[in-house]
Image (tube, rainbow, N blue to C red):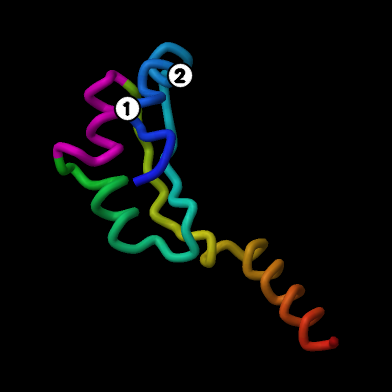
Amino acid sequence: EGYPELEDILDYVMYNFKEVTLVPFMMVAGDHAINDMSSDDEDSFKTILKRAGLKTNCIIKGLGERKGIRDIFVEKIKRISAI
């Protein structure tokens, strides 16, 4: 639902990589990450990339599950509350 779409970059990815790892760029890995990105559905990113001959890995972990990202948020909240 944005630009570029997977189809816009698929040729570039196919000719420059043999393996890809899909990681959601969202705070929480919810419905989009599970269904649209990594499911076995015909139109998921994983299926499209596999069909193009790429080894495809999926990490279903939102940014909010990563300690470093949480630390950034905590530090910003601390700075804001000190104002």
* Distance between mark 2 and mark 1 Cα atoms: 15 Å
- The residue at the point 28 percent across, 61 percent down is 31
Q: Which residue is mark 2?
A: 17
Q: Position of residue 49 (x, y in %)?
A: 30, 28
Density class for disc 1 (Cα within 10 Å; few <14, some 14-19, many ≥20) is few
Say which quarter of the image contains residue 56: top left
In the picture, the disc for residue 7 is 1
- The residue at the point 34 percent across, 54 percent down is 33
Q: Earlier in the sequence, mark 2 or mark 1?
A: 1
Say which of 20 and 75 sits in front: 75
Say which quarter of the image contains residue 73: bottom right
Which portion, as a residue range, is magenta? 42-53
Q: Tell me: 83 left or right of 46.
A: right
Circles 2 and 1, Cβ within 8 Å, touching? The answer is no
Q: In the rendered structure, which amino acid carries the disc numbered 2? A: Phe
Determine the residue located farthest toward the left in the rendered image: 42
In this view, 10 is above or below 67: above
Q: Tell me: 81 left or right of 41.
A: right
Q: In the rendered structure, which amino acid carries the disc numbered 1? A: Glu
- The residue at the point 71 percent across, 67 percent down is 72
Q: Position of residue 68 (x, y in %)?
A: 67, 62
- The residue at the point 53 percent across, 60 percent down is 63
Q: How many marks?
A: 2
Q: Quadrant of the C terminus?
A: bottom right
In this view, 37 is above or below 67: above
Q: Position of residue 77 (x, y in %)?
A: 72, 80
